[in-house]
Image: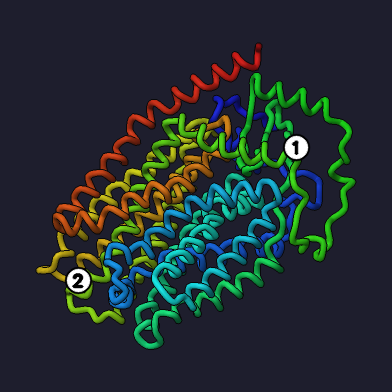
Amino acid sequence: MTLLKPVKQGDALLVDAAGDIQRLPLPSQDPNDPLNFTVWEKTGVMVSCCWFSIMSLSIVGGLGAILTTFFEIYGAEGISNSQVVWLSTFPSLFVGIGNYLVLPLGLVYGRRPAALVSIAVLFAATIGCAVSQNFHQHLGLRILQGLATGATESLLPLMLSEITFVHQRGLIFGVYWATQNVVTSCLNLATSYETAALGWRWFYWVYVIAVGAGLVIVVFGCFETRYQRRAQFLNGQVVVTDQFGVTQVLSGPQAEEYRRELEADDGSTPDEAREKHTYWQMLQPWGTPVKNTWTTVLMAWFHMFEAFTSPGILYATLLASAVLGSSVGVSLTYDTVLQSYGWPARSVGLINLGGVFGGFGGMLYAGVFGIWFILRMAKRSGGVHTPEHRLVLLIFPGILTVASLLLYGFTASGGSTWGGPYMGWTILQVAFVSVLIQSTSFAAEAWEKNPGPALAAVVGTKNIVSFGVSYGLSPMVARYSYPTAMGILAGICGAIFLLGIPVYSFNPAWRRYRQRRESKKAML
């Protein structure tokens, strides 16, 4: 029998003494356990999540290439250009706010009902945008789209984590985030041509069709993944999966606490005695609410905000926010920049080819190479993986982020070649996808007390904080210049990346300090 090596709290044993990868969390013998779903059932969940996320984020982030169209239309209503930009920035803000609303809904009523409600709201809001008659109607419906899209930042990643093992999640999330970038960029390639040929309303009508198809896919393929997974013993340690889908391997006082709870809980139905749900039962659109509904919601919010006491979580949030804000901010300017280089308005959408290359590049680096690197580091450490291993992988994206912003800034004003801003955008997308994958993976591990809320806090808050970055970029460009504005942004991003050095050293000490406190509480 292979024994697990004792690990420090917050670390995880991914590779055992024989060199085999551990399958965590441990699947139960219950046929309805999401980890025991058939291949087609898991595929249905994955396709549903990816389709929903791609279409929703394409809608939220797809206006950059056609903003000049809205400058002309709403300028006649007396709306300033800075206000028109709200059509692109405010939805991103409300994606973050929606995360804090949709996730508790999924925790209380189930993942499937929350997903159905979210995509139905997105479908209705997109129809509303297509038929809107003035700027304020349009803006209000764009905000509603952002709220519904909040599911992509919290609920959908949670569902994916609940049907996969820990060692698979780096690749799965890499595919999830990268396909968002790649397919969204492909869809938005045609945006400017579509608007020039058919009018701006067809930007929305096309997505009405796509989101409608997604609604059908979710109804028939997005199964409930909420599952009350019992703590399980594995060679003297306890494997626990929380309601946010995050798995921990516990030892010491916390393991003893779970051991006592398991011994006391002997009245439930054995897993192997449960019957497999039929397909029609799995299509049930509602779930059984948890007991103490408001307590569950309030505690979820409390644990999310409590996570920011961790230096690692603060760092992951700042980093993801800065890079996302930079990406959104640049997307608000490339329409004007490329037209100043002589690009016709209908061709501006071609810059999204950079997003395609960037998405693949980020997935290969952070997803494929990242998994190899993490497993290699774990083997070198006796099979033990520490969260801080992921910070090493942020060095390369940090260099790319600073370089891409400087390249874009110093070529955006003209006098050079359109290849400068084009390549700046492409390189930034490689960095963006890489940072998104690694920062969220780090967040799920950096705070062992409640890793699920910590992950939800990072992915949701990054949209709120990044709003400030993107919202302030256009006025800064107008007041100073592209080189100055992008130089300031590059400096901010570079400084945040460098904070990873003290976090690499200090966060393990902070985790040990928290563990000592928890151990003392458990002994009282």
Q: Which residue is mark 2?
A: 418
306 over 455 or under it: above or below:
above
The residue nearer to you, when weighing 390 against 489, is 489
171 over 299 or under it: above or below:
below
Cα separation, mark 2 vs mark 1, equals 57 Å
| Amino acid type, callout 1 | Arg
Residue at horizontal 38 percent and vertical 60 percent from the top: 361
Residue at horizontal 73 percent and vertical 46 percent from the top: 227
Residue 171 placed where, x, y %?
Answer: 53, 53
| Amino acid type, callout 2 | Trp
Element type where label 1 sits in the image: loop
Counting every numbered tag in the picture gives 2
- Left or right of residue 418, residue 367 in this image: right
Label ID, residue 230: 1
Give neighbour class at mark 2: few <14, some 14-19, many 20+ (Cα, 10 Å): some
- In the rendered image, is residue 18 in sight? no
Give neighbour class at mark 1: few <14, some 14-19, many 20+ (Cα, 10 Å): some
The residue nearer to you, when weighing 367 against 498, is 498
- In the rendered image, is residue 64 in sight? yes
The residue nearer to you, when weighing 392 against 219, is 219
Residue that protrudes farthest toward the bottom in the picture: 197
Residue 412 placed where, x, y %?
Answer: 18, 64
- Left or right of residue 37, residue 508 in this image: left
Residue 302 placed where, x, y %?
Answer: 56, 34
Specify which label sits upstream in the sequence, 2 or 1.
Answer: 1
Question: Which corner quadrant holds the N terminus?
Answer: top right
Residue that protrudes farthest toward the front in the picture: 78
265 over 67 or under it: above or below:
above
Label ID, residue 410: none
